[in-house]
Image: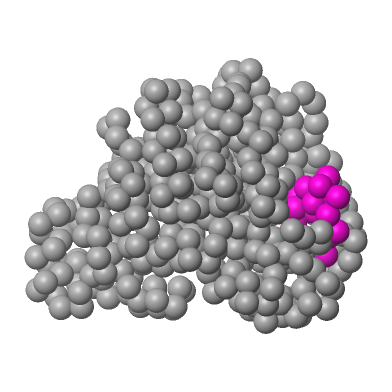
Amino acid sequence: MFDSVLIANRGEIALRIVRACKALSLRTIAIHSEADADLRHVALADQALCIGPAPSRQSYLDMDRMITAARLTGAQAVHPGYGFLSENAAFATALRDAGLQFIGPSPEVMALMGDKISAKAAMLKSGVPCVPGFDQALPDEVGELERIADAIGYPLIIKAAAGGGGRGMRIVRTRGDLRQAAQITREEAGRFFGKEDIYLEKFLEHPRHIEIQVLADAHGHAIWLGERDCSIQRRNQKLLEEAPAVGIDRQRIADLGQICVRACLDIGYQGVGTFEFLYENGAFFFMEMNTRIQVEHPVTEMLTGVDLVAEQIKVALGQPLTLTQQCVAPSGHAIECRLNAEDPWTFAPLPGRIQAWVAPGGPGVRVDTHLYPGYEVPAHYDSLIAKLIVHGSSRQQAIARMRVALSELMVDGLATNAALFAALLQNGDFQAGGMEIAALERLLATGVLKQGGSV
């Protein structure tokens, strides 16, 4: 049990966690870098503490400073949000050793699912469908590497075992490209993730990205809360998410959801989590599990009415789930657009000061943001500044509501990618539904979206 939570994050997710904690009558402690002293969650929390300079490695990624902050403020639990230390098993272990509750799964489960090789082995054992490939760390010896690749068949994709966030992967289409791709990926894996292990899978040419939201407690209960289609991406970075997934048989989705529930129980998972799959030619293939709250969790909340952050905290408090699978009844359609401070066509980050900010409203419209007039978006962190989420009784209504919401949005003094979403919502391919992962980049390459046309 705990009655105080330190929020080890910043921006809109930190504000979201403050609100959930207050609704549960928990004391909130905000930590912040020197650049973030004026963020809204800092003002709204019961207590706040600066933990270091603006660079993340000296503040939000510094585990020792986080633990010191928790001790100084009397915090009993730590909520990591997403990004930063949210999937760092060493951080969860350090908190446990310090007598603090990590709001998330156990360090052992995080380590299991954080390594793509061990995660895939665990999923295969639980009956989760996986991409065909070599399910061990790849050898350094070139001849053995070539034999493994030849047996699977090209095209292939090499990935960092500890990778994530779209980094640490290379597509290999011919044997001649294999050696260099493996070497570069191995070096990138060590540089970004501190572990050089890489693995190999069959590369799917035209998949969609479908994910299953799960929730599990410490009492042997687990449920799934629907799926999300996250296929609108650029360079493996999600931009728009929606649910339900268009054009996929509902029984297939339900069967997959139950498989994910069984896998949660098999590995002893606790808290919220997301199973991510590729979907191609009517088949699902497991990619990874995110052992934290997702950026796109509001999509599921809009469909189900379930407060996922509050449920995550209640699980950490040791409470059994009050929801059963029969209670989960998603309805309508929801869409989320990630509003970033960046050029809408080149995606170059464009930090700056907000001169004026007017959020959209109306039926079925939700805005998750930490913005306010006068706020200066720093250059030190991710460019996400707001999430626009809409819900409608149908996909057509949800698209219409998002179009209106984008037209009402006013952000003066700062460039955003709102124009990209406005163009995408008008595009015939998007309106038809079921776009695959590479579709947005093809549209951008042809200039179709910028011209306002359709293909």
Q: Say which residue appears at 25% left-offset and 60% top-offset.
A: 135
Q: Residue shown at 53%/66% (left/top)?
A: 107
Q: Residue at x 34, y 62 (%)?
A: 118
In this orientation, which residue lies closer to the viewer: 296 or 207?
296
Is 373 on the left-hand or right-hand side of 262? Answer: right
Pick the front one: 58 or 68: 68
Numbered label tally = 0
Q: Relative to 224, is 126 above or below?
A: below
Q: Is residue 203 visible?
A: yes
In x, y percent, where is residue 453? 50, 30
Colour convention: one colour
- Which quadrant would residue 283 be assigned to in this image? top left
Asked if residue 421 lies in the magenta stretch, the reply is: no
**The N terminus lies in quadrant:** bottom right
Asked whether the viewer can see residue 164, the reply is: no
At x 30%, y 57%, the residue is 121
In the image, residue 435 lies at what x, y percent? Answer: 42, 33
**Looking at the image, residue 81 lies above or below residue 361:** below
Residue bounds of the magenta highlight: 9-30
- Residue 27 painted magenta: yes
Q: Position of residue 179 (x, y in %)?
A: 20, 72
Instruction: Please state which of residues 312 and 330 is positioned toward the viewer in this rendering.
Output: 312
> Residue 245 versus residue 98: which sits nearer the camera?
98
Q: At which x and y percent is residue 4? A: 81, 61
Among all residues in the image, which is located at the extreme front?
A: 219
Quick one: quadrant of the C terminus?
A: top left
Q: Quadrant of residue 375?
A: bottom right
**Would residue 264 be found to the left or right of residue 282 on screen?**
right
